[in-house]
Amino acid sequence: MCHSTGVGGAPKVGSFDDWRPRLASGPSGLLVSVLRGKGGMPPKGGNASLSKTDAHAALEYMLSLAK
């Protein structure tokens, strides 16, 4: 939800410019942010039951749209 509109500074899905500064930490660094939360984003995007595998898949999907 937040990534569709950019709420709270979330990088918007499909916007390479929004994702560019975050890509510097690499996929593993981004996954850590997904799992632990960052800024206003809660851990696992607010879904405590989200598995690491599913979190990684969601991250990969969002990154694929930003290329």
Image (cartoon, grey):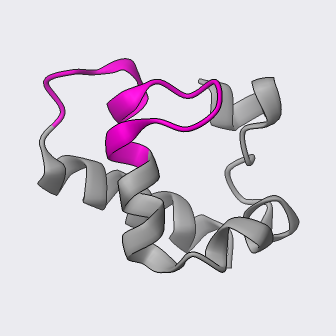
Q: Based on the displayed image, in which of its 4 quarters is residue 9 positioned?
A: top right
Of residues 39 and 13, which is closer to you in this image? 39
Give how far across and how far down residue 53 sits, in percent. Answer: 14, 56
Give how far across and how far down residue 23 sits, in percent. Answer: 64, 75
Give how far across and how far down residue 56 sits, in percent. Answer: 28, 59
Position above or below: 9 against 62: above
- Whether the magenta-drawn stretch holds residue 48 is answered as yes
Position above or below: 63 against 42: below
List the single residue furthest toward the right. Answer: 17
Position above or below: 47 against 17: above
**Left or right: where does residue 29 sit relative to residue 57?**
right
**Left or right: where does residue 29 sit relative to residue 55?**
right
- Whether the magenta-drawn stretch holds residue 54 is answered as no
Q: Based on the displayed image, in which of its 4 quarters is residue 45 positioned?
A: top left
Q: How many marks?
A: 0
Task: Give the residue displayed 45% in from the left and 68% down from the top.
Answer: 29
Of residues 59 and 40, which is closer to you in this image? 40
Task: Give the residue displayed 37% in from the left and 30% down from the top.
Answer: 43
Give how far across and how far down residue 30 sits, in percent. Answer: 47, 62
**Left or right: where does residue 34 sit relative to residue 64?**
left
Position above or below: 10 against 21: above
Give the residues in magenta.
34-50
Look at the image and tell me in which quarter the N terminus lies. Answer: top right
Task: Give the residue displayed 55% in from the left and 28% down from the top.
Answer: 41
Look at the image and tell me in which quarter the C terminus lies. Answer: bottom right
